[in-house]
Image (cartoon, rainbow, N blue to C red):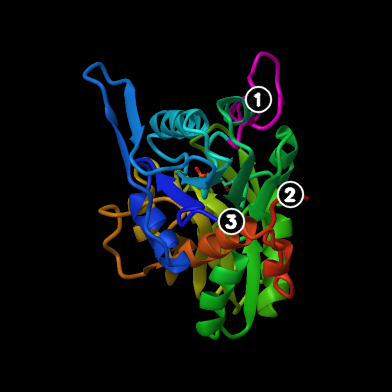
Amino acid sequence: MKPNDLVVITGNAHPRLARAVTDSIGIELGEVRCGRFPDGEIEVKVLCDVRGSDCFVVQPTCHPVNDNLMELLVLIDCLKRASARRITAVIPYFGYARQDRKDEGRVPITAKLVANLLERAGAHRVLTLDLHAPQIQGFFDIPVDHLYASPVLGTYLRQLQIENLVVASPDVGGSKMAWSYAKLLGGRFAMVEKRRVSAEETQVQFVIGDVKGCNVVLVDDMISTGGSIVEAACVLKDKGANEVYICATHPVLAGNAVAKLCEAPVKQVILTDSIPTEGKIQDPRFHICSVAPLLGEAIRRIHRHESISSLFRGSARGMRGV
Ligand code: R5P
C-alpha cells in the first residue's frame, strides 16, 4: 500500500476544521493550492501525489455558499483527473438543503441539483452531518454516510447536569430530533408550533407540553437568521420555563443572528464547528463543540471499510423529519 493511501484535502471553506480532522486521524492535511484567477475563477492544484489514493475533500458548503460549493466541485474534478482511486466529499454542513421539495409552482429543488453536480464532478461517496432533511440521501445514486452530532452535543449537555429537563423543538419538523435528544438526555419532550411567514420571518402559535418551572433545551439542526429559535425561547420563557438553553448543529448565523441570540433570554447557546464562527462570537454564553473527532473517526472507518452505523449504537439519532 502507498504511504499516502489516505489523503484528506480542503478548500477555503473551513481549513481549521479540516486540520482538526486530520490531527484526530493522525495524518497531515494534503497540500493543495486553492486560489482565484484575476477574474475570480477558481484556480486549484493538488500538490501531493493522489494517484490510486483514497481521497477525502473536507468542505462545508456554508457562506459564501456558491464559492464554497464551486471550490468543492473543482477539487473533486481535480482529484478525478489526477487518478484518485476513490473520492469522498466530506460536507459537514450541506448548503441548499432547505430547498428539498417543490412545495409551490415554479421553484427549483436545489438540494437535488447539488447532489447531481457532486456526482457529475466525480464524487464516489458523500459523508455529511445532520442533513436538514434526511431524505436528501435519496437524491444521490452514490453511498451517503449521514452522521449525527447528537453524541457530541449530548456529551456536553450531559456534563451540564440540567435538572428537571425538557427538550423542546422550535417547530414540527424538528420534533423527531428533539425526541431523540430527550431520550438521550432522559428529559421530557415539548414542541413549539411555528409557522414560517417568509425566509426571514416566523410566527409562533402555541407550545405543546408543560414547561412551567422546567429547564428547557431547545434543539434544532441549524440557526440561520436566529428568528425561529429566539422566538421559541421567548415563548418558552412566557410559558414559565426556568432556564432556556439553545443547542444547534449548524451555526449558519446569517445577518444579525448573533446579536439576536445575545439579546435572547437564554443561559447558553451550544453549537458545533461544522461551519466556522471565528470572529463572529464574543459572548461567553456561546459554547462550540468540535465535530472534528467524529468526522475523523468516520473517515478512518470508511477508509478501512468498517461500519459507520455502529458509531451511533446506543446513542440517539438526532434526525429531523416527522
Ligand atoms: C427549519 O426548518 C430549520 O430547522 C431551522 O429551524 C431554520 O432553518 C432556522 O432558520 P432561522 O434561524 O432563519 O429561523
Question: To which residue does mark 1 refer?
Answer: 109
Figure quadrant of the N terminus = bottom right
Residue 301 in picture, x, y percent from top left: 63, 62
Which circle's residue, 2 or 1, is located before the other in the chain? 1
- Give the class, few, some or many, for how many residues have Cα within 10 Å of label 2's Cα (few <14, many ≥20): some
CB under 8 Å between callouts 1 and 3? no
Three-letter amino acid code at the position of disc 2: Gly
Task: Please tell me whether mark 2 or mark 1 is closer to you in this view.
Answer: 1
- Nearer to us in this view, 9 or 263: 9
Is 104 inside the magenta-drawn segment?
Answer: yes
Q: Quadrant of residue 155?
A: bottom right
Three-letter amino acid code at the position of disc 1: Ile
Q: Residue at x 70, y 15 (%)?
A: 105
Q: Residue at x 41, y 35 (%)?
A: 68
CB under 8 Å between callouts 2 and 3? no
Three-letter amino acid code at the position of disc 3: Asp
- Cα separation, mark 2 vs mark 3, equals 11 Å
Q: Which residues are magenta?
A: 97-115
Image quarter for ligand 1 equals: top right
Q: Quadrant of residue 317?
A: bottom right
Q: Does any atom of ligand 1 lie closer than 8 Å to the CB of label 2?
A: no
Name of the residue lying farthest toward the front: 1
Mark 1, secondary structure of its residue:
loop
Q: Does any atom of ligand 1 lie closer than 8 Å to the CB of label 1?
A: no
Name the mark on residue 220. Answer: 3
Mark 3, secondary structure of its residue:
strand
